[in-house]
Image (cartoon, rainbow, N blue to C red):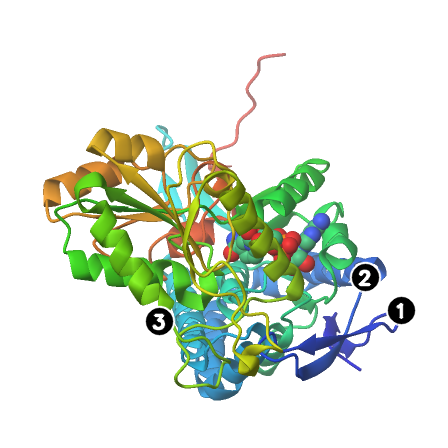
Amino acid sequence: MTDLLIGGRWTGAIDERTREIRCPADGSLVAVVDEGGGKDAAEAVAAARQAFDQGPWPRTPAGPRGDLLLRVADMVARDKDALARAESLDTGKRLAESRLDVDDAVACFRYYGRLVRTETGRVVDTGTAHAVSRVVHEPVGVCALITPWNCPLPQTSWKVAPALAAGNTFVLKPSELTPSTAIALMRLLVEAGLPDGVANLVLGPGPEAGAPLTDNPDVDMVSFTGGLRTGRRVMAAAAGTVKRTSLELSGKNPNVVFADADFDTAVDHALTAVFRHSGQVCSAGARLMVEGSVHDAFVEAVVHRARGIRLGGPFDERAQTGPLISAAHRARVEAYVAAGLAEGARLRCGGTCPDDPALADGYYFLPTVLDRCHSGMSVLADESFGPVLTVERFASEDEAVRLANDTVYGLAGAVWSGDEERARRVASRLRLGTVWINDYHPCLPQAEWGGFKQSGTGRELGPGGLAEYRETKHIWRNTRPRPRGWFA
Ligand code: TXE
């Protein structure tokens, strides 16, 4: 088998191990792929190092680099159906959502393909006629790109596109659960004409194939998206050689609803915010906060509609959301709900697996609402990353802000209010990387994405996303060199 890409060569894993990829919707076999480990990771880093130090890519001007990205964007668009299908089979995600994810990847490659051509260095005033000073951008070097399983193709594109735009070489280590679109994307990069060794792909479990990338001295940067605990480990490992790190570690995102919000629209979005992809979205609005005077009616409306959500596999057109990624993850979500109930939360709906025999082979979990949640409970401190909505009540604007900020996370969230001034005021006080006002979830390639506090370091998307993968160098040129004579 030949699923790893190392130095321009498709190859199997050194230890010849393989892994079965199964669809979380029904357990059916999707693919058998190579499963690498530390030795494969080391070879991939060596190939990326050589391509960076000696190959043409880092020295290729921005124009042709941008052209290659635009070609990749066209190819991803061309292969949309196949990529969306592969993404859905690996993740269990509805095909319609996977198609949107492919569009997201296309937009990302287009955005960086165009941006890199227009981003130039700058000339700095030296204050003397005898020197010229320029500030230029250069690639960081060899990047380790480690991605998770919830939105594999966009998450990979958000790293690969700016890393390449900046002129880096990289080793990609996708989640061991969802490698298919990463393999497909690497094939497109080769087809687009990327020089050998610039893009390398290692498959395998995090501790075996991912960890060796994070402390390898030949890796200059680690860009990681995943859980907070793993993120801390990655940061600690990278500290040994002071690597640049860019981390996106998800959140426990507040969705704050004031009494003067458009009730029906806010209810509708509260559902999409958390139950889309069964809550397996880093920005999921899993923490609903409602102003006291409308709290009961609002929660009642959310619960009523949550009970009616239809579960199903990726190709079931009637399904509104799908399964969780694995049995282990479902067990984590079950334990999270049990902990909340033990601490005094009230179960309003869901809380268990569906009893529909047609869903018995998948890792489904019913849309769940827990109300009467308050500070100090583990369900408010932790992320479930499942279809679980916690509900809190607040009495004033100040209290809403205080509660919403009372978390180690700071990725995203929303404010719902008919009072524009108040919505803006609250948005500016929330310690979050993204705040939506009277909306939830939109994301643009041209606007930065990333977390405050322990939701991460660094930014993805936007010009800031490109900056993550670049060094900035100051070049001073003396145009009239003369002896200084200090030590004459
Ligand atoms: O993620 P991990 P897991 C959150 C979510 C979820 C929890 C755990 O709360 O319940 O994380 O999920 C690789 N060195 N998110 O365990 O471990 C791993 O192989 C280097 C949020 O699945 O973070 C995979 O490629 N790499 C999130 C990637 O890290 C390591 C998306 C993510 O896996 C490694 C997913 C190590 N020591 C989960 N250990 C988001 N922000 O969108 C694992 N990996």
Along the viewing direction, whichever of 168 and 313 lies nearer the viewer: 313
**Residue 15, numbered circle:** 1
**Alpha-carbon span between mark 3 and mark 1:** 48 Å
**Alpha-carbon span between mark 1 and mark 2:** 8 Å
Amino acid type indicated by mark 1: Asp
Please tell me which of labels 3 and 1 falls first in the chain: 1
Please tell me which of labels 1 and 2 falls first in the chain: 1
Of the two numbered discs 2 and 3 in the rendering, the one whose residue sits closer to the viewer: 3
Assign a secondary structure to mark 3.
loop
Q: Name above or below for residue 279 compared with residue 178.
A: above
| Residue 97: quarter of image | bottom left
Along the viewing direction, whichever of 9 and 157 lies nearer the viewer: 157
Q: Name above or below for residue 349 compared with residue 248.
A: below
Residue hosting label 3? 308
Assign a secondary structure to mark 2.
loop
Q: Residues within 10 Å of mark 1 (few under 14, many from 20)?
A: few
Residues under numbered marks 2 and 3 in contact, where contact means CB atoms less than 8 Å apart: no
Along the viewing direction, whichever of 246 and 374 lies nearer the viewer: 374
Of the two numbered discs 3 and 1 in the rendering, the one whose residue sits closer to the viewer: 3
Q: Residue at x 64, y 72 (%)?
A: 179
Q: Residues within 10 Å of mark 2 (few under 14, many from 20)?
A: many
Assign a secondary structure to mark 1.
loop
**Residue 37, numbered circle:** 2
Q: Position of residue 144 (x, y in %)?
A: 65, 55
Along the viewing direction, whichever of 239 and 326 lies nearer the viewer: 326
